[in-house]
Amino acid sequence: MGVLVDLQNLLNNIYDELYERIGTGAVADYIPELAKVDKNQFGISVATTDGQVFSVGDATTAFSIQSISKVFTLTLALGRYGNSVWKRVGREPSGSSFNSIVQLEFEKGRPRNPFINAGAIVISDLILSGHQPREAIGEILDFMRYLAQDESIIVDHDVAKSEMRTGHRNLALASFMKSFANLDHDAAHVLGVYFHQCAIAMSCEQLASAGLFLADGGRNKALGLRVVSAERARRINALMMMCGHYDASGDFAYRVGMPGKSGVGGGILAIAPEKASIAVWSPGLDGFGNSVLGTAALELLAHRTGWSVFGA
Ligand code: GLN
């Protein structure tokens, strides 16, 4: 009993301690629809591998998962294409911003990793193979609903449209890769898939449940099945640790020490292997596009639980 009660208390305490800082950071205003989000929101959910869920704050409010979707599209692409995915995209930290274009020219259109935008666009291109864009989006959405066991999860079409109208830099990245023959489909079609996956709206509770397979050696006990092999779960975690926060991945490892993936909607999914899947959300971002309060919450949580993979 003690451990579970402690975890709820711990979340309550973290929430109370950070309460005064709610609203710090800046919303992602380069996506006009995200600029409208009230930044005075903050939620945390922890789904443990023994099937419990603990939450505090705005943990049932849906938000735009944005780049957190890249973890799940990578999982789908690896399931379909296995290691041949790595012919198209690397596995190294980029040390540059999520939407940087400079490295792509030096490295001949093969993005550094699947979590920067260019890499995720290549992954969307793979998922699009053999499908219409609408079907590929449906496949990604179905996967999220299945993992979270929640059919109510939707794509926020206003957010997707907002990015379609303003995502010129992503179009540049996609076109640039097309010039290196690292995109099979039309850039516009691939971006249609990419923008819609980013526009999936989920709450902390839904996201923590969806990520549970990564904390439990590839299994999801609630579903009673294996989602990926233990080896694949371990490797996805490794990529999240090295690349999940772009050019702030080192700092996230230093402060939090768990595999994590952020999104410009203000969410972060973090994995405590064998222990829990954690989703935090607060829309205010730092200069790297990562949630200020979300990172602070994970730092406190990792410190107090000893869940850093580098030791207590
Ligand atoms: N959809 C966003 C973009 O492409 C995702 C970026 C992010 O969440 N870091 O710019």
Image (cartoon, rainbow, N blue to C red):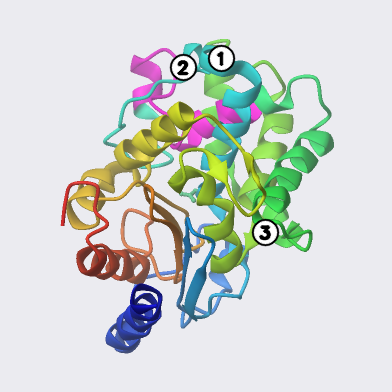
**Which element type, helix, strand or loop, lies under badge 3?**
helix
Q: Residues within 10 Å of mark 2 (few under 14, many from 20)?
A: many
Q: x, y percentage for residue 68?
A: 51, 49
Q: Is 311 in the magenta? A: no
Q: Amino acid at mark 3?
A: Val
Q: Secondary structure at mark 2?
A: loop
Q: Amino acid at mark 2?
A: Gly
With 31 as the anchor, is 4 left or right in this view? left
Crowd band around label 1 with a 10 angstrom C-alpha radius: few (<14), some (14–19), many (20+): many
The residue singled out by tag 2 in the image is 109
From what the image shows, is residue 146 above or below residue 205?
A: above
- Residue at disc 2, CB closer than 8 Å to ligand 1: no
Q: Please give the residue where the numbered disc 3 appears in the rendered image.
A: 159
> What is the C-alpha distance between the residues marked 2 and 1?
6 Å
Mark 3 burial class by Cα count in 10 Å: few <14, some 14-19, many 20+: many
Decide which of tag 2 and tag 3 comes sooner along the chain: 2
Instruction: State the residue at coordinates (66%, 47%).
Output: 224
* Residue 244 percent coordinates (x, y): 38, 43
In the image, which residues are magenta? Answer: 103-125
Query: Is 54 positioned to the left or the right of 155 in the image?
Result: left
Would you say the residues marked 1 and 3 are in contact, meaning their CB atoms lie under 8 Å apart? Answer: no
Q: CA distance from mark 1 to mark 3?
A: 27 Å
Asked if the residue at label 1 sits under 8 Å from ligand 1, the reply is: no
Pointer 2 with pointer 3, Cβ within 8 A? no
Residue 90 lies in quadrant: top left
Which kind of residue does numbered mark 1 sit on?
A: Asn
Q: Which residue is mark 1?
A: 182
Kindly check if marks 2 and 1 are in contact, taking CB atoms under 8 A apart as contact: yes
Query: Percent x, y for residue 285?
Result: 38, 65
Q: Which residue does the image show at 61% across and 75% down from the upper left? A: 61
